Amino acid sequence: MIKSLLKQDIILTIVTFILIAIGIVTVYSTTQYSSGIRELIFAIAGSVIYFLTMNLDYRVYKLRLFQILIFTGIIILLIAVFLLSKKLNNTHRWFALGGIDIQPAEFAKIVVILLSSSFFSIFLKTENFLKKVGVGLIMILPIILLVYKQPALGTSIILFFIFFMILFASYYDQNKFILATATFIFSTLLITAFLGSNLLGANINFIIININIAILGILIIGLYILYRLIKHKMHTTTFLIIIGLGLLFGSSFKLVVWDHLLKSYQKNRIIGFLNNSNSNLNNSTNFQTKQSEIAIGSGGFWGKGYEEGTQSRLDFLPESTTDFIYATFTEEFGFFGNMVLLFLYVIFISRILIIMSETKNRYAFLIIVGIVSMILIQLLINVGMNLGIMPVTGIPLPLISYGGSSLITTLIAIGIAQNIHINRDLN
């Protein structure tokens, strides 16, 4: 324990707890005693778990028994949330355990990081790329689908993003991987453009709207250029399979994803985001975003002052301590406070990236890739939706948004990163 404390990245620990303190202070300013004290309790419990995780050798996570246990455990928790919880805002995301609300989807992020990192830590040149990816997807797909069914679309997207980034980092030829991904995207856009402007069943202004023959021609030329670039790296058959998958995904988007998988409120959020100039949508679907923008803009340079934010304290700003806590903080502390907050996040992520660059163990390297991906995508999505440049999703601001499951999950991830730093010389 003492050895770990001495060898830890002390800057990462200090910045972590500064961000936690900012979260507690911001939550308290909006809700006063109740939620502020609860967040403090979550922080204390999370701190204990953080230091325990810091002292647990990360190589334990690669043991087959451990992986079976965490996979089985998260599946049980994700099923239990449907059986033991009551619907809250038409979702099944939390269940009470000893008076504490548990959100299993948050812990699923750590499970996906550990499982994917172990699976892809060995990626041989002789292995079939599509087969390897397919097996990896089958491994984590039950977790993603159960999270999606809660429904928690934003979190399920994050889980897939973590998987994708670990896959990318593990692949022995990353240029080939980029070209293959670009081929899939171009193929998806090609069929999407071909299907026309009614794909989403709404009159929206988006890249797929008003696409003409010239755009289709550009996409076809793009695919040809990609083929010329990739043909010495990939068999033509594999290239055509990737195109086929892209065409299948694009063509099935309307019939499968849009018509059957997405909930009505999820569709409204997407359409509202893309139609942000529509007055009717501004008064309904985009209400949260507009209130967030008002809160951020009204803060000015120095902010209105602590406990002086009107949008949050007068309940104009929905979810002011969770999804929109960034707007709450900026309203009170202004542009200056916002820059300080983002600077702290830059230091925070930079320290984790330094740990990633120092490690000599491939498995450990992939774990850090997953941790950075998890934190960075949540930061970008949360700040983006607060600024109105991304659709509204229930994604928390790491270490700051109110919620014990989110806070503890992030602290577990950082604790693992610290242990990797402590054992960075291990091969």
Image (spheres, rainbow, N blue to C red):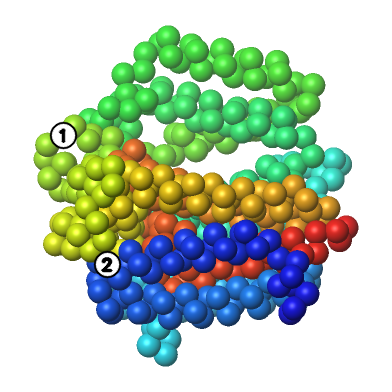
* Amino acid identity at mark 1: Asn
Q: Position of residue 118 (x, y in %)?
A: 74, 60
**Where is 400 relative to 378, above or below?**
below
Closer-to-camera residue (59/53): 53
Residue in the foreground of this view, choosing between 384 and 210: 384
Relative image position of residue 36 (x, y in whole percent): 33, 74
Give SS at disc 2: helix
Which quadrant of the figure has residue 108? bottom right
Left/right of residue 68 with respect to residue 202 in the rendered view: right
Q: Secondary structure at mark 1?
A: loop
**Which residue is at 43% across, 51% downward?**
341
Residue under pointer 1: 278
Q: Which quadrant of the rendered structure holds the C terminus?
A: bottom right
Q: Which residue shows up at 54% across the image and 15% down it?
A: 220
The answer to whether residue 306 shows anywhere in this view is: yes
User: Percent x, y for residue 133?
Assistant: 68, 47
Q: How would you rate the neighbour count of disc 2 (Cα within 10 Å): few for under 14, some for 14-19, many for 20 or more?
A: many
- Residue 67 located left or right of residue 214: right
Q: Is residue 317 visible?
A: no
Residue at 85%, 40% (x, y): give it: 125
Decide which of tag 2 and tag 1 comes sooner along the chain. 2
- Residue 317 image point, x, y percent: 20, 56
Question: Which residue: 45% across, 77% down?
Answer: 42
Instruction: Mark 2 vs mark 1: give the one in front.
Output: 2
Q: What residue is shown with label 2?
A: 29
